Amino acid sequence: MEVKPTNSEPRDTMATTVQVLLDAIEQLGEELASRDDADLTFRVSVPHDPPAIRILAELINNIGENVEKHLENGEIDMLRRTKELTQAYNAMQEQHEEMRKELEMACRIQERLLPGEQDMPDRPELACAGYYAAMSNVGGDLYDIMRVGKNSYAVLIADVSGHGVPAALITALVKIAFRSRTRWGIGPDEICRQVNAELLPILGDLDYFVTAWFGIINLENGHLSYVNAGHNPSLLLRSDGTILSLDSGGRFLGQFDDGKFQVAEQALHEDDMLLLYTDGIVESRNLVDEEYGFERLQNCLLNSSFSDSASLVEVIHRNLDAFRMGAAQRDDISMLAVDFRHAIAPEKTDPEKPPAATDAHEDPSTIVGGRERLAQDLGREAAILIRADRRQEAAEILGSALILAPGEPVLLLRLAALHIIEKQFGPAQTCLNAIVNPLELSVEMQRQFDRLSGMLKSRKA
C-alpha cells in the first residue's frame, strides 16, 4: 500500500511530510517486530523537496524493500533446507529399516545355530538345557551338543571376542567347524586342533579369537574327556554336593598355528551335572558396579535346590538377574547344563568299529553333516522370506547356503526361481546348470526343474 501526505496549506506541507515519515518509521518498526506476519509492502511518497526529507523517505522505502527481499530469500532457503533435511531423514529411516531387517535376519539365523529343546538328546541317561542372551541383537556366544556314534555325545560352549554381527558370523563358522570334525574315534584334542587350523586363516590377521570348552561323554561308562581352549573351566556338580572345576591346558582358537591342546579326563557318576558357561555370567555387574564373580556362582550352586538341567539353568538365571538389579547387560551370556542320570551297559561291539547309530538324523557322521544342516536351516529361512515378498534378502540367504552346500538342488531351484522373477535369466540358467544330475531328482523337484527350464526358454524366445 502507499502512504501519502494529506493535502493542506503549503506552510503545513513540511510538517505533514515529516509526520508521515515518522508514522512510516513507526509502522516499519512494528512490522519488523511482528516477524511472523510482517507486512513490508507499504511505501511512502517521496517528495522532491527538501532533499533531506526525500533522502529519508527513500531510505525508509529501501529498508522495507531490502528486509522484504531478505525475508523472502530466507523463506526460500528455509524451504530448501527443510526439503533437504526431510530427504536426509527419509534416507536415514530407510537405512535404519534395512539395518533392522538385516539384524532381525541375523538374529533369527543365530537362533537356528543354537540347539532348541527339540534338538536336545532324548535319552533316559542324559538331559540337557541351555540359555542364551545376547548383549545386543546378536552376539558371539555359542553352545551345542552333538551325537557321536550311538552312545556318546559331544558338548561345546564357545565365546568369540567382540560383539554384534561380526562375532555372530564367526560363531556360525565355529559351529560348522566343530560339527564337521566331530567323529567317533577322534579325541577332543585332535578335533580342537583341526578347528584351530580351519579358523586360523580366517581370524589370524583380525582382532578376533575364540575360546571354547569341548568335551565328549561316553554314556556306556560315564567317561568324560575334554579340552579347555582358553575358556572358563566348566563345573562338575557331584551328586554328593561337591563341585569340581574342569580345566586343561590349551590356548584359544584362531590365532596360533602351533595349536596344541591337552586332554583331561573325568569319571561321571550317577546324577552328576555338568555346567558349561561363558564369562558373561561371572563378569556381570550390578548398579553399584560390583562383579558377580565365580564365588557368587559357586555359592548359588551350593545353596540352591535344583533337580535337573532345566531347573539348574533357571536357578542361575534368576540369581544373576536378582544380583544385577536391572543393570544393563555388558556381555553375551550363555550356559549349557548337562544332567548325567546314569550309565548304560556297554554292548558287545568291535572296539575298532564305531557303534551303529540308531537315529541317523542325530548322528553327525551321516550324510547330513554340520554344513549341510546349517544350509538346510538357511534354506528354510529363505523360504520364509520369499513368502514375505522379501526376495532380495532371500536370494542373499540362499547364496550363503550354497556356499555351505554347493550343488544342493533344493537351494538351486529356489534361487533360480527368484532370478527368473527378477528377470535375471543368466544367473537363473547358471543355477539350473549347476544341478549335476537333473534326472535323479525326485518327481516333484523334476517338475520344478522342467517348469523353470521351460520358463527360461520362453523368456529367451
Image: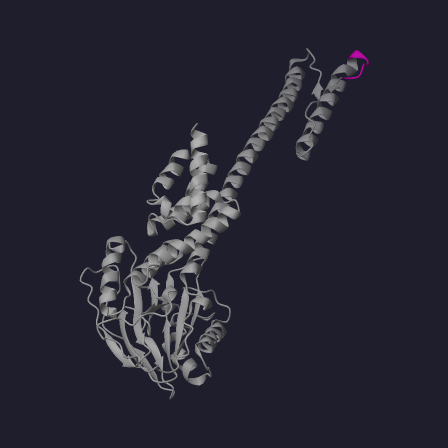
Quarter of image, res 70 = top right
Quarter of image, res 151 = bottom left
Which of the two residues, 226 or 370, is positioned nearer the viewer here?
370
Tell me if residue 12 comes above or below residue 244 in the rendering: above
Which of the two residues, 219 or 175, is positioned nearer the viewer here?
219
**Which colour scheme appears in the figure?**
one colour
Tell me if residue 49 comes above or below residue 132 in the rendering: above
x then y, percent, for residue 307: 46, 82
Whether residue 168 appears in this view of the structure is no
| Bounds of the magenta segment | 5-10
x then y, percent, for residue 115: 42, 65
Whether residue 7 appears in this view of the structure is yes
Tell me if residue 6 comes above or below residue 329 in the rendering: above
Left or right of residue 82, residue 206 in this image? left
Q: Is residue 7 on the magenta stretch? A: yes
Residue lying furthest left in this view?
Answer: 258
Which of the two residues, 330 or 336, is positioned nearer the viewer here?
336
Tell me if residue 411 comes above or below residue 34 in the rendering: below
Q: Residue at x 48, y 72 (%)?
A: 321
Quadrant where the C terminus lies? top left
Q: Residue at x 80, y 17 (%)?
A: 6
Q: Main secondary structure of the magenta part?
A: loop
Left or right of residue 199, residue 451 in this image? right
Which of the two residues, 316 or 180, is positioned nearer the viewer here?
180
x then y, percent, for residue 263: 23, 73
Q: Residue at x 67, y 17 (%)?
A: 53
Residue lying furthest bottom in this view?
Answer: 240
Quarter of image, res 249 = bottom left
Left or right of residue 234, residue 105 in this image? right
Q: Is residue 352 on the magenta stretch? A: no
